[in-house]
């Protein structure tokens, strides 16, 4: 063995021996990485609670307006065309039915009361853009910041993503324009930038936590970081509940509500930004990527500064061809299962409105004001989150080091396939005559996706690859997941909304059954990393042995693990190997 490798083994050995479950260093890392993930979930989830309100403010359905009001504000009293040209609504055609409902349920109503009950009529292109632009930004951020995390360091890039999220969240709340399309366009611009920060946080949070933890605690702590996604869901729903009560009945309350909710997305990253800025780079990155063996030996083993300088090693250019030849199949397994999982996970929202309506949790849109709709939608989402989604995350935290990652992933895909198959085969019967069973199956599908592949697809890429490629590989796999999410949201949504809705929905449900089953099959190439060190899994020490010392004379590193003789090899002058990109920008 080379002396550099021997020193690195002793340094990493001491780190691995610090395997207390409640190690303060690891707890602080969960706080900083989890804070970013809480913001990720909040910012991605909050828009689904606010889209209907934004649509009511800027694109009201004029069919629910009285004819005289349409004329007064200049709306055509024949046909109303949205900017995309896909909706043709005759103004005031539903006004008479709305009057009947108001007379029966809100005696003494005013014109303003009636106008506040008009549902959204947002053009399809604006609706799709608002829902998807952050996902697209997330995909780009996962690829770009994942690669930069390997090239420039985890600490610097993790800090950068948090700053981007803070700025973009605040600016999202200040989206203005001269017309509704201008407001939505500005909002989409800032949410794309917000997505960049969110996307970068995926690989960086996972990588930092994985490299900070030990083999005995790594799975638990990385799962705990991911479980902060559930905290983000909880905070988003709670914030919307509180704001809907604060702004209910107040003039311009609807506009202030959605802007305030978006602005509060900056709170979690602000709370953890300073800790992220002062937290040092991970020892594994310093040794395996930067070659700072001596610096880490000084910090961990107590070597003198002079001795540490002599142990510097020159970084070796990474070889993508070598990486793919050794880790290509695990990379394929992680990317494909995350892609398939997110198709199924995100497309489950396509029949969420059915669940809420059947359960009586969400009244008809025209019977609510915009602020009321935010309240009832947030309440229904919180019931699902508290009853199934959030417990699933923490079941993974509690069992991942007992069961292992692969058994949890297999279990989740099997049960998701089973529950989705029952929903597909008995959809009409369940939602008509077996409402409680319908809701239970829906909740169980979410529960076992989180106590299953939704958690493990995040954990595995942070463990299975060498340090030089760890952040890039995680970002690559996560980007495939977001591509699946985009397909799940829009591809399956379009399929659901075929002319014959029931046939379209049943077809989509059966496709989701097949998607979950394919995810089970694609788990096969992924090895189980439970109980193994990152260096054993990623063969990092084999790679380190090829580095060259920058010193030209022997040295001794004295520390609390004993004295290590270092006989550095002479520095050789060789041209760096070319670096293929394999599409990871």
Image (cartoon, rainbow, N blue to C red):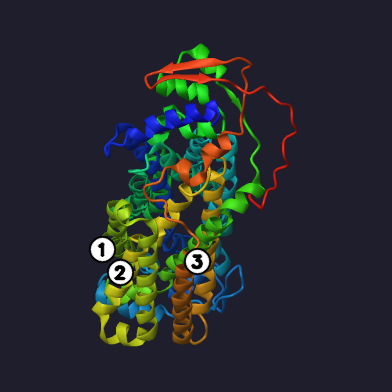
Number of on-image labels: 3
Horizontal side of 419 relative to 387 (left or right) equals: right
Q: Earlier in the sequence, mark 1 or mark 2?
A: 1
Q: Which residue is mark 1?
A: 387
Instruction: Please tell me in which quadrant of the rendered image residue 17 appears.
Output: top left
Q: Position of residue 550 (x, y in %)?
A: 62, 21
User: Which element carries disc 3, helix, strand or loop?
Assistant: helix
Q: Mark 2: few, some, or many residues within 10 Å (few <14, many ≥20)?
A: many
Q: Position of residue 509 (x, y in %)?
A: 44, 78
| Residue 173 visible in this rendered orientation of the protein | no
Q: Which residue is mark 2?
A: 443
Camera-nearest residue between 585 and 524:
524
Give the distance between the C-alpha atoms of the residues marked 3 and 2, in whole angstroms: 25 Å
Q: Which residue is mark 3?
A: 522
Q: Earlier in the sequence, mark 3 or mark 2?
A: 2
User: Which element carries disc 1, helix, strand or loop?
Assistant: helix
| Residue 509 visible in this rendered orientation of the protein | yes
| Vertical placement of residue 485 versus 549, above or below | below
User: Which element carries disc 2, helix, strand or loop?
Assistant: helix
| Vertical placement of residue 321 versus 352, above or below | above
Q: Are marks 1 and 2 in contact (CB under 8 Å)?
A: yes
Camera-nearest residue between 82 and 207:
207
């Amino acid at each position: 063995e080379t002396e550099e490798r021997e020193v690195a083994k002793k340094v990493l050995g001491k780190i691995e021996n610090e395997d207390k479950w409640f190690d303060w260093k690891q707890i602080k890392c969960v706080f900083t990485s989890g804070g970013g993930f809480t913001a990720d979930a909040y910012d991605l989830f909050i828009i689904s609670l606010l889209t209907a309100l934004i649509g009511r403010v800027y694109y009201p359905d004029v069919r629910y307006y009285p004819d005289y009001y349409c004329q007064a504000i200049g709306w055509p009293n024949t046909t109303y065309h949205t900017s995309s040209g896909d909706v043709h609504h005759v103004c005031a055609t539903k006004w008479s039915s709305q009057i009947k409902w108001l007379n029966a349920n809100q005696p003494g109503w005013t014109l303003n009361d009636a106008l506040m009950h008009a549902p959204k009529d947002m053009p399809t292109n604006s609706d799709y853009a608002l829902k998807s632009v952050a996902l697209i930004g997330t995909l780009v951020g996962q690829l770009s910041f994942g690669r930069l995390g390997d090239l420039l360091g985890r600490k610097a890039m993790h800090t950068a993503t948090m700053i981007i999220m803070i700025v973009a969240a605040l600016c999202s709340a200040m989206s203005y324009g001269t017309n509704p399309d201008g407001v939505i366009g500005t909002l989409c611009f800032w949410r794309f930038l917000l997505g960049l920060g969110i996307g970068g946080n995926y690989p960086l949070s996972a990588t930092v936590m994985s490299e900070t933890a030990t083999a005995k605690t790594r799975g638990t702590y990385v799962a705990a970081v991911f479980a902060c996604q559930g905290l983000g869901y909880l905070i988003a729903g709670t914030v919307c509940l509180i704001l809907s009560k604060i702004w209910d009945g107040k003039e311009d309350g609807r506009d202030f509500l959605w802007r305030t909710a978006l602005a509060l997305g900056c709170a979690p990253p602000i709370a953890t930004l300073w800790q992220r800025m002062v937290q040092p780079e991970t020892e594994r990155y310093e040794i395996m990527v930067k070659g700072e063996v001596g610096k880490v030996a000084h910090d961990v083993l107590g070597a003198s500064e002079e001795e540490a300088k002599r142990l510097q090693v020159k970084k070796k250019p990474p070889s993508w061809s070598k990486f793919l030849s050794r880790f290509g199949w695990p990379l394929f397994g992680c990317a494909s299962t995350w892609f398939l999982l997110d198709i199924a996970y995100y497309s489950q929202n396509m029949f969420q409105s059915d669940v809420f309506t059947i359960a009586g949790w969400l009244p008809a849109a025209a019977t609510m004001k915009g602020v009321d709709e935010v309240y009832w939608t947030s309440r229904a989402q919180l019931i699902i989150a508290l009853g199934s989604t959030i417990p699933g995350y923490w079941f993974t935290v509690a069992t991942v080091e007992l069961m292992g990652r692969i058994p949890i992933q297999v279990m989740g895909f099997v049960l998701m396939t089973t529950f989705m198959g029952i929903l597909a085969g008995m959809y009409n019967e369940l939602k008509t005559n077996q409402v409680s069973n319908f809701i239970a199956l829906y909740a169980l599908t979410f529960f076992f996706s989180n106590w299953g592949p939704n958690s493990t697809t995040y954990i595995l890429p942070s463990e299975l690859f060498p340090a030089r490629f760890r952040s890039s590989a995680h970002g690559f796999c996560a980007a495939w997941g977001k591509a699946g999410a985009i397909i799940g949201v829009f591809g399956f949504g379009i399929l659901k909304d075929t002319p014959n809705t029931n046939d379209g929905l049943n077809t989509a449900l059966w496709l989701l059954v097949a998607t979950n089953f394919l995810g089970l099959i694609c788990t096969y190439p992924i090895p189980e990393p439970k109980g193994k060190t990152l260096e054993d899994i990623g063969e990092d020490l084999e790679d380190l042995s090829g580095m060259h010392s920058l010193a030209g004379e022997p040295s001794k590193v004295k520390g609390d693990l004993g004295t290590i003789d270092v006989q550095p090899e002479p520095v050789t002058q060789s041209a760096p190997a070319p670096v293929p990109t394999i599409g990871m920008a």
